[in-house]
Amino acid sequence: VDYGMQRIDLRVNLDIDLDNMYDLECLKVLYSYNWNQGTYLIHRHTEHQGTLNQWLGAWEPKASSQERTLILEDSMIVSEQFFAALEREWNANNDDISGISLEPSFVTYH
């Protein structure tokens, strides 16, 4: 993906399963991943959150911030042009847009 000259801070929220276990393969990938667009933070939950709570607690915007967020699930595959498309939408509608979803509407949250 081409992020241009943008600084992109990446935060990964890792849920714990109902048995209080982390997926070891996922941990290996996360801790070996090299992100050079900005800061890279892995947040490991200590209690199971589930999809809905993960989404609701993923980001808390500040009232005066120009900060933007993108929430992706680990099961999603995005186009290499996804960032350019998001930038176009954000820039064209910057006062009128509160969010853009890439998640299908038929997802069941539990």
Image: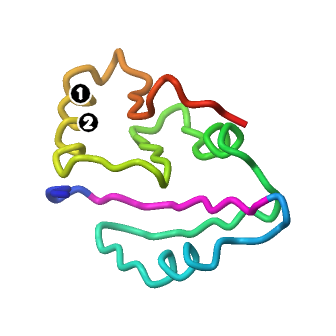
Asked if residue 105 lies left or right of residue 90, the reply is right
Disc number placed over residue 86 in the picture, else none: 2
Hey, what amino acid is under mark 2?
A: Leu
Hey, what amino acid is under mark 1?
A: Glu
Asked if residue 84 lies left or right of residue 75, the reply is left
Residues at marks 1 and 2 touching, judged by CB atoms closer than 8 Å: yes
Say what secondary structure mark 1 lies in. helix
Observer-nearest of 106 and 70: 106
Q: Position of residue 24 (x, y in %)?
A: 63, 79
Q: Quadrant of residue 108?
A: top right
Q: Position of residue 109 (x, y in %)?
A: 66, 33
16 within the magenta span: yes
Identified at 27% across, 30% down, the residue is 90
Asked if residue 38 lies left or right of residue 1, the reply is right
Q: Position of residue 75 (x, y in %)?
A: 46, 51
Q: Quadrant of residue 19?
A: bottom right
Span shown in magenta: 7-17
Asked if residue 12 lies left or right of residue 76, the reply is right
Identified at 68% across, 59% down, the residue is 15
19 within the magenta span: no
